[in-house]
Image (cartoon, rainbow, N blue to C red):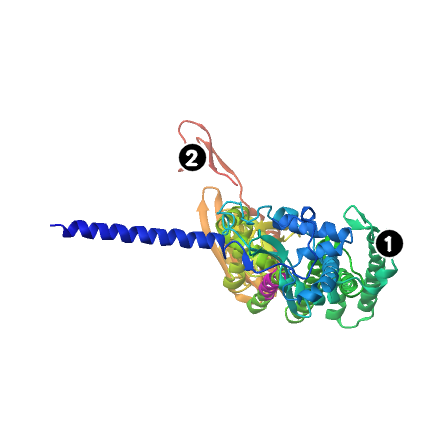
Amino acid sequence: MHTPSISRVRRACHAAVAGALLWASAAVAQDGSDLWYEIDAINQGLADPATEQLDRTTPRQSLRGYIEATEAQDYDRAAHYLNLSEIEPDEQAETGPEIARRLSSVLARQVWIDWSDLSSRPDAMIEARSDSNPRAGQPRRNLEIATLETGGLIYDIRLARYKPAEQSAVWLFTPQSVENVGVLHAAFGPPPYEQRIPQILKREFAGLWLWEWIAIPVLLAGLAALGYATHRLTLWLAGRSRATPLKRGLDRSSMPLTILVMAGAAQLLVTYVLSFSGPVQAVVRPALIVLMVWGVGVTALRILDAVLNRITLRFVGEIDDKRGRDEREFYTSIYALRRLIILVMVGLALLAVLVQLNLFDSVGLTLLASAGVLTVVFGIAGQAVLGNILASLQIAFAKPVRIGDSVLFEGDWAYVEAIFYTFLRLRTWDHRRIVVPVTYFVSKPFENWSVAEARMMKVIDLRLDHRADMEVLRTHFDKLVRDDPDISESDSALSMATGHSADGLNATFYAMMDDPSTGWMVQCRLRERMMAFVRDNHPSWFPRERVQEVGRDGPDADPSGGVSRLAGTS
């Protein structure tokens, strides 16, 4: 009878022991690896610093104290913000200040510090909401200050939290960062000419050194002169070129080539000659990369346009409905190829900018965290644009309408002159241009007179008197069709009485035309000649009104008297 009670006691004891173990492990984790790196001692080879001069409790205070020490050229104090554990203690006093000096030179020239991004908490916990940052609420013991690339390799500058035995935890530059200082200083340190700059010009004003305020305008003036020379040289080469595609490509690419040369020259100067401060580097470097990528992309696109235009003019010629179906499909395919190339180039350009600026690391988590919001925002804001782009690609591949097709759209007869990403441009017969959004165009019914072939049947309607002889009219119309030089299929001509009413006889004449534009001219010409034939030879066939006096003898006599209308004209 006592067995169940003993089992419950044992289970309670086991649960208490397990809870104690979990609490102990949580306490160890809280006091250990999640918050800091445990070390035996910090920089044993350095002289003991004045405690009141060092505040290394948070990442922000550590970096601020280091920069204040280097600005005061107190490199002995600045060395206490470095973790020199990889250096022998008897060498730390000598090499520590020199490493601190070199690191400060690299930071001043390559890093624009965002102080708001540095935590002011000892545990460096991210205090943002969890939906905006996946690591929100988690303590950190290692922070990235900057990532620099040289020689095809990536080097990090980082702060980490260390806790020596029986002492408080502090934030220091990591041993790996200290080891990277030599390579980074050789790549980004001050150039030799900077030693000749007077010390007074190295003072800071409005975030920049004084000598930078002088060098930047001079650099811009030199780049402007280089750009002008490049522009003139490109135009001169275009004028001297005998090859039409090269001439057209150089002429249209003069501006992007100029921008590319200017940005490339500036990039070379900033990389190998000039060494600006961090704020200038933070603005100039991304701007130069964007300009260079834009210059390369636009130049390549302009040259490609010139080549495609040359191919089009050689194999197709000017766009009108006299061209065959294959030629119009070829022209439309050229436009589709151009749009696909633009999309690919834009994607590659964005990828190149992201890779060159190392934005994947900083933007990746944010994009993943806010993917749903971005999808909604871009879906709403870009719905019309994306819809038009997809519709234009649909037209390019399905080809319900092609460039050069003759269409009747909302009462306007026009040619499809161009198909762009978001709109079509139609050229009417009187040389007006109608710009139609692609989604609107494909959602409305339209007549494509060139969908299968350019030929079409033109119709001429004449309203004549009842006495008109259709056989005489048919004979004369057939003769006109045979004698017209613009009609190649005279056997297809037809003449029919298509209607009859009290107003008269509807005589309709049909003739096959080679294309809509020629057909319209021939249609008007045939109408004029048929009207002239009736006027000169049978004027009585024109429609007329007839009246009959009532009361006269005849089958239509009206016993009531008066005048009765029997027929009228329209």
Residue that extends furthest to the bottom in the rendered view of this protein: 243
Residue kind at label 2, given as amino acid type? Asp
Q: Give 207 or 298, whichever is nearer the viewer.
A: 207
Q: Is residue 211 left or right of residue 15?
A: right
The image quarter in which residue 142 lies = bottom right
Q: Is residue 343 magenta?
A: yes
Figure check: 137 above or below 287: above
Where residue 310 sits: x, y (%)?
A: 69, 69
Q: Callout 2: few (<14), some (14-19), or many (20+) C-alpha neighbours within 10 Å?
A: few
Identify the residue under disc 2.
553
Figure check: 336 above or below 532: below
Which of discs 1 and 2 lies nearer the camera? The answer is 1
- Residue 475 visible in the picture: no
**Cα separation between marks 1 and 2:** 129 Å
Residue that extends furthest to the left in the rendered view of this protein: 1
Q: Is residue 85 left or right of residue 67?
A: left
Where residue 305 sits: x, y (%)?
A: 67, 65
Q: Give the structural element (helix, strand or loop) at label 1.
A: helix
Where residue 414 sits: x, y (%)?
A: 60, 54
Q: Which contiguous range is marked in magenta?
A: 334-350
Q: Give 324 or 170, whichever is nearer the viewer.
A: 170
Q: Give 155 or 439, whichever is nearer the viewer.
A: 155
Residue kind at label 1, given as amino acid type? Gln
Identify the residue under disc 1.
199
Where residue 454 sits: x, y (%)?
A: 55, 63
Name the residue at 45% across, 41% down: 502
